[in-house]
Amino acid sequence: MRIFFVTNNYTPYSGGVISSITATTDALRAQGHEVFIITLDFLGAQQHADPDYVIRITCPIKFMYKKNHMAIPWRPTHTITQLLKQYSPDMVHVHHPFLLGVSALRAARRMNIPCVFTYHTLYEEYAHYVPIPNLCAKPLIRSTVKRFCNAVNGVIVPSSGVKEYLCTQNITTPTKIIPSALRSLFCTPDTKPTAIRNKKHYELLVVSRFVPEKNIPFVFDVFKQLPNTFTLTLVGYGTDYELLQQLAFNTLNLPPERVRFIHKPPIDDLLKYYRNADLFIFSSQTDTQGLVLAESMSQGLPVIALDGPGQRDIIINNYNGFIIENAHDAATKIISIATNAQLHDKLISGARATAQHYHTDFITQQLLDFYSMTKIK
């Protein structure tokens, strides 16, 4: 097939959506399919180190908002229509219900090409990124996303929690649960055979964007309740990176020798952090999937997580981790795992087995099957 992925977010951004697009693109192209990524020109055409299948739409207006690159495209519907005429794709797959997503849907309709949409995000929970008051932003986002979902030919959701939510919004478009695939790096087996016994330190890991909706202060609440044999590594980036360091070290007086922040490491280093840790902590309650959960499990790392829509499909209590209710519950579970090597071994095995369901070949076949079932409205 020839497929257009249309996304508002791509490099220099990083995060779950970009990881999902990259992993899926690589897997489809490895199988012989043609995939083109249509996105915004955030930095200027000469400053992006893109592969030849990435097409940047001209953006005469570029600016920063909350330390994020923003760009406003010039005549995106016309540009995408011309690209559709030039390449004649079999499928247009959009990853956002705004901006380029709207333009791609319009262009696909004009060209009578099916258009599907992956519902990556609970958009209402990110209303604080829109430069209008939340009281106005949330209803506007809700109605816009609903209208978009009912206009496309198919909707892909990463978890059952999101599908249930869409049902409450009266979305009538055919919907399929297909989680995001792991990047190929995480499809390699880890070398950790079992839980490491008699360790002097038990290492907890967080991999996240450092932004309000990720709820990182919850992790500090948990950590304060643990004995001094535990260490905590927080890997990521975001607008709250420095604020969280101030909270940890200046306000909460967490010991720097036991808590460290790692800012946006290379992907190979990220893999090492997963492999060196003993347990993964996930504090967000707004993620639709939380791809880091599958990444951690692929490296034999069990998960302790607050409840949320992205957690319920992947975490099975007492098999690959635990969904907990509060910080005290989390600390109790962490201590019980750290002091019970048999339980830890069991959770490691369950995590590895779970991650198999997120390998690229398994996920891309589901995606191709959904494409083949999609019909023009």
Image (tube, rainbow, N blue to C red):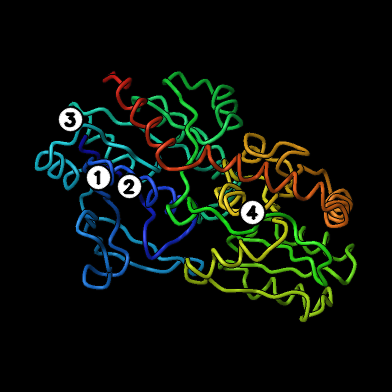
Judged by depth in the image, the label closer to the viewer, 2 or 4, is 2
Q: CA distance from mark 2 to mark 1?
A: 6 Å
Q: Nearer the viewer, residue 289 or 348?
A: 348
Whether label 3 touches label 4, CB < 8 Å: no
Circle on res. 110: 3
Circle on res. 213: 4
User: Mark 1 packing: few (<14 Cα in 10 Å), some, or many (20+)?
Assistant: many
| Residue at 17% over, 48% down | 79
**What residue would you read off at disc 2?**
25
Whether label 2 touches label 1, CB < 8 Å: yes
Q: CA distance from mark 2 to mark 4?
A: 28 Å
- Does dot 2 land on a helix, a strand or a loop? helix
Which amino acid is tagged 2? Thr
Q: CA distance from mark 3 to mark 1?
A: 21 Å
State which tag comes first along the sequence, 3 or 1: 1
The answer to whether residue 298 is seen in the rendering is yes
Task: Give the image location of residue 9, x and y in percent.
Answer: 39, 54
State which tag comes first along the sequence, 3 or 4: 3
Q: CA distance from mark 3 to mark 2?
A: 25 Å
Judged by depth in the image, the label closer to the viewer, 1 or 4, is 1
- Please identify the residue farthest to the front as the structure is shown: 193
Which amino acid is tagged 3? Arg
State which tag comes first along the sequence, 2 or 1: 2
Circle on res. 35: 1
Q: Nearer the viewer, residue 114 or 2?
A: 2
- Does dot 3 land on a helix, a strand or a loop? helix
Task: Give the image location of residue 242, x and y in percent.
Answer: 64, 76
Judged by depth in the image, the label closer to the viewer, 3 or 2, is 2
| Residue at 56% over, 52% down | 295
